[in-house]
Image (cartoon, rainbow, N blue to C red):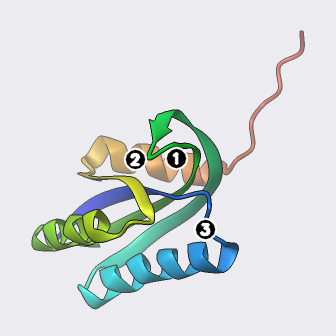
Amino acid sequence: MRHYETVFILSPVLSSDQIKASIDKYRSFLVKGNATIAHEEEIGLKPLAYQIKHKKNGVYHLIEFVSEPSLIKELEVTYARDETVLRFLTFALDKHALAHNMERRSNGKKESKKEL
């Protein structure tokens, strides 16, 4: 079992119900594949660095999970077949990345404001 993180970008023209359905589809795919979801983050609508399929924005979603390596190929084939997914990236996390993710989550989204 290895730790992985997957990020996928959904088309911005989807309704909120369609976005939730797509996210649930991939979450349930991982659970059915005996993966354990460690963390999930809905990043939301963000501008893309360059246009993808004539879209300037995308809905980002991140899932951190633990699974067998064989599940990754199936997950990426499922992403590739889904026309609502603009881009995806799945990568294995090493101990340093895991430590960084834990630290980032423990600090939350609080950022210190510097005085000018």
Q: Are marks 1 and 2 in contact (CB under 8 Å)?
A: yes
Residue pushed farthest left?
A: 70
Looking at the image, the residue that sits furthest to the bottom is 32
The residue labelled by disc 3 is: 14
Location of the N terminus by quadrant is: bottom left
Q: Does dot 2 land on a helix, a strand or a loop? A: helix
Query: Residue 113, percent across and down?
Result: 83, 26
For this view, does 81 lie left or right of residue 56? left
- Single out the mark in the foreground, 3 or 1: 3
Which residue is rendered at x = 44% and y = 47% of the image? 53
Q: Which mark is residue 99?
A: 2
- Number of residues whose C-alpha sits closer than 10 Å to that of mark 3, classed few (under 14), some (14–19) or many (20 or more): some
Residue 12, by quadrant, is bottom right
Q: CA distance from mark 3 to mark 2?
A: 34 Å
The residue that disc 1 covers is: 103
- Percent of width and height locating residue 71: 17, 74
Q: Residue at x 59, y 77 (%)?
A: 18
SS at badge 1? helix
The residue at 49%/36% (across/down) is 51
Query: Does label 3 or label 1 sit earlier along the sequence?
Result: 3
- Amino acid type for the residue under numbered disc 1: Glu
**Mark 3, secondary structure of its residue:** loop
Q: Who is closer to the viewer here, 82 or 69?
A: 82
Query: Quick check: 111 left or right of 32?
Result: right
Q: Amino acid at mark 2?
A: Ala
